[in-house]
Image: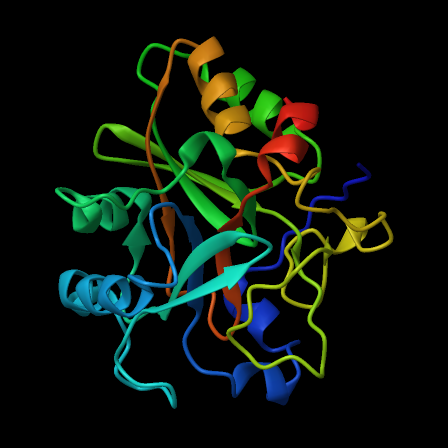
């Protein structure tokens, strides 16, 4: 992947966004979820709304709720973020149920923050290897308490103007006006199969004697989808 480091601050980037993008409201999180069926979809959405109520924005047209949607045999949970959200927060909400996030099949898109215990590693080498993953660009890294927070810029879903906001039926991901790595906008689009996986990030971190404690999504990245998709089992087997 071609890359050209940019020195623009995030605040400056927002000045470049079209007004129509800024008007979209809070970011909304999309994650694959196993255990949902047509029969229990309504109950699953209600349960998740109750458990995640503090993370959901009340200032959206769709209401203060979690929705579950199906695409190609895989169910997804979606909600507009009212606060920063970690994968651990979502999994805590699923504890004690038959629902789960398939971490080892999770492919990430958009901006994501890796929360890394890097005390036994060499951060510079760790960051270089993370940055070397396909479609991955390090926007920034910063220490916080005993963690290293690494903000990763990944391709965003290519939106179809005929599809309603909140759809999960994506098959193409590319850099756009919301991306930090503008130099990579000419790269070929990614697919769910070629997006970086949670497992790939975890493996790089582990190789450097560090530990991936959580991944998080920030309210800072407004009016856009964040999160991940997954693959059918056959495609997953090919990718692995």
Can residue 167 be seen here? The reply is yes
Can residue 174 be seen here? The reply is no
Q: Quadrant of the N terminus?
A: top right
Give above or below for 212 relative to 171: above
Residue shown at the point (38%, 90%) measured from the top left: 61
Give above or below for 129 relative to 85: above
Drawn side of residue 114 relative to residue 110, left or right: left
- Position of residue 9 measured from the top left corner of the image (x, y, whole percent): 55, 60
| The image quarter in which residue 8 lies | bottom right
- Position of residue 32 measured from the top left corner of the image (x, y, whole percent): 44, 50
Count of all numbered marks drawn on residues in the image: 0
Residue shown at the point (22%, 62%) measured from the top left: 48
- Position of residue 172 measured from the top left corner of the image (x, y, whole percent): 73, 56
Drawn side of residue 128 relative to residue 102, left or right: right
Q: Nearer the viewer, residue 235 or 38?
A: 38
Residue shown at the point (14%, 67%) measured from the top left: 50
Residue shown at the point (44%, 82%) measured from the top left: 25
Q: Nearer the viewer, residue 185 or 166?
A: 166
Q: Quadrant of the C terminus?
A: top right
- Position of residue 235 measured from the top left corner of the image (x, y, whole percent): 67, 34
């Amino acid at each position: 992947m071609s890359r050209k480091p940019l020195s623009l601050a995030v605040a400056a980037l927002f000045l470049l966004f079209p007004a129509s993008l800024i008007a979209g409201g809070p970011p909304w999180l999309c994650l694959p979820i196993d255990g949902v069926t047509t029969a229990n979809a309504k109950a699953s959405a209600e349960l998740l709304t109750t458990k995640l109520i503090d993370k959901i924005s009340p200032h959206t047209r769709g209401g203060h709720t979690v929705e579950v949607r199906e695409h190609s045999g895989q169910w997804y949970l979606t909600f507009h973020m009212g606060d920063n959200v970690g994968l651990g927060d979502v999994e805590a909400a699923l504890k004690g149920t038959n629902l789960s996030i398939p971490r080892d099949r999770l492919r990430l898109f958009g901006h994501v923050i890796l929360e890394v215990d890097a005390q036994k590693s060499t951060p510079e080498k760790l960051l270089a290897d993370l940055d070397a993953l396909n479609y991955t660009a390090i926007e920034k890294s910063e220490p916080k308490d005993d963690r290293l927070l690494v903000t990763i810029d990944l391709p965003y879903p290519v939106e179809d103007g005929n599809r309603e906001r909140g759809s999960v039926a994506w098959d193409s991901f590319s850099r756009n006006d919301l991306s930090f790595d503008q130099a990579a906008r000419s790269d070929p689009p990614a697919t769910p199969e070629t997006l970086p996986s949670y497992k790939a990030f975890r493996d790089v971190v582990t190789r450097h004697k560090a530990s991936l404690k959580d991944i998080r999504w920030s309210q800072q990245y407004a009016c856009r989808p964040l999160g991940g998709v997954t693959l059918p089992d056959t495609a997953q087997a090919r990718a692995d």
